[in-house]
């Protein structure tokens, strides 16, 4: 079946512009995560959605970052007034349910370059 | 707080040789532990996971890992490496509370030479 998809695959933007990244989770997966992967570093957790519960935003690095999810479907991560330090690969993952037991399935990521 | 250390940034092995990638974690309780592989241009793929029980876990593609509580380690092994194993490998520990998100190490890049 279809896996997690993300769009665009690559995004180049100028400093100060807003960008929107999209994630389509696996159908039926109630949990959705966003991670950021900077060059040469591991993944950093950004935000988590579980069903219709309030999202866990504890990993968002600043108030320029926000994310939405409609029910158990598509999620968008928005970065306002982008800065060069926002350059990274943004990865989305979904899992059947919340809880460490459930495998997280990752999308291919969106590579964001801020010039 | 949870954390993961992968001390080797880059490892080079010959095809057919054995492989061991190191992972040390910091966690206050019995952790959920994972190894993921990331090939160029692709998302992360789960190789194996440990939750409880037998400390030697088998994964896909011939990989295995051993949980050693006394050493806070979860090293990944493969007896004979194939050229297609060249990739980036990430160890992760799962949070048992809140978002249940994963905490990742910085990764080990594996190069396989013929």
Image (cartoon, coloured by chain):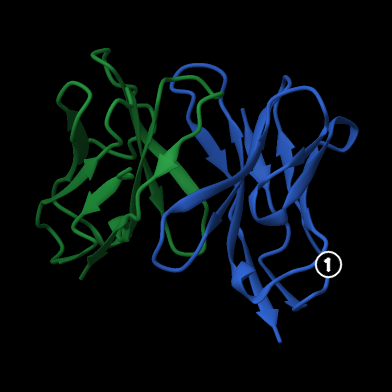
Chain colours: A green, B blue
Q: Is residue A103 rendered to the left or right of residue A48?
A: right
Pointer 1 chain: B
Q: Which residue lies most toward the top here?
A: A53
The quadrant in which residue A12 appears is bottom left
Q: Quadrant of residue A84?
A: bottom left
Vertical relation: B21 (above or below) A66: below
Q: Secondary structure at mark 1?
A: loop
- Nearest the viewer among B24 and A26 is A26
Q: Quadrant of the N terminus of chain A?
A: top left
Question: Which quadrant would residue A108 be assigned to in this image?
Answer: bottom left
Q: Residue at x 70, y 27 (%)?
A: B27
> Residue at 55% across / 38% down in the picture?
B103
Q: Residue at x 87, y 38 (%)?
A: B71
The extreme right residue here reads B70
> What is the x, y in percent for residue B97?
52, 16
Q: Residues within 10 Å of mark 1 (few under 14, many from 20)?
A: few
Residue at the spot of label 1: B18
Q: Closer to the camera, B69 or A29?
A: A29
Q: Is the residue B11 above or below the residue A109 in the image?
A: below
Q: Residue at x 30, y 36 (%)?
A: A26
Answer with left or right where residue B97 lies relative to residue B2. Answer: left
Residue A93, x across and y down, in percent: 37, 39
Outermost residue on the bottom side: it is B114
Position in image of residue B114 (x %, y %): 71, 87
Vertical arrangement, residue B61 with respect to residue A34, above or below: below
Q: Which corner quadrant holds the C terminus of chain A?
A: bottom left
């Amino acid at each position: 079946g279809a896996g997690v998809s993300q769009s665009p695959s690559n995004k180049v933007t100028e400093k100060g512009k807003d960008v929107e990244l999209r994630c389509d989770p696996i159908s039926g997966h109630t949990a959705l995560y966003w991670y950021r992967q900077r060059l040469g570093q591991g993944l950093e957790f950004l935000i988590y959605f579980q069903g219709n519960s309030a999202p866990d935003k504890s990993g968002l690095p600043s108030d320029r970052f926000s994310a939405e999810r409609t029910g158990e479907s598509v999620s968008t991560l928005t970065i306002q007034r982008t800065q060069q330090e926002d350059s990274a690969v943004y990865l989305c993952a979904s899992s059947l349910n919340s809880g460490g037991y459930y495998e997280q399935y990752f999308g291919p990521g969106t590579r964001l370059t801020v010039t | 707080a949870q954390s993961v250390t992968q001390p080797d940034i880059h490892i080079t092995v010959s095809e057919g040789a054995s492989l061991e990638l190191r992972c040390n974690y910091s966690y206050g309780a019995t952790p959920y532990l994972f190894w993921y592989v990331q090939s160029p241009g692709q998302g992360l793929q789960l190789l194996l996971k440990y939750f409880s029980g037998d400390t030697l876990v088998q994964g896909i593609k011939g990989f295995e890992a051993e949980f050693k509580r006394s050493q806070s380690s979860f090293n990944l092994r493969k007896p004979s490496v194939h050229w297609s194993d060249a990739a980036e490998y990430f160890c992760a520990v799962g949070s048992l509370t809140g978002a249940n998100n994963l905490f990742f190490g910085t990764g080990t890049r594996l190069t396989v030479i013929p």
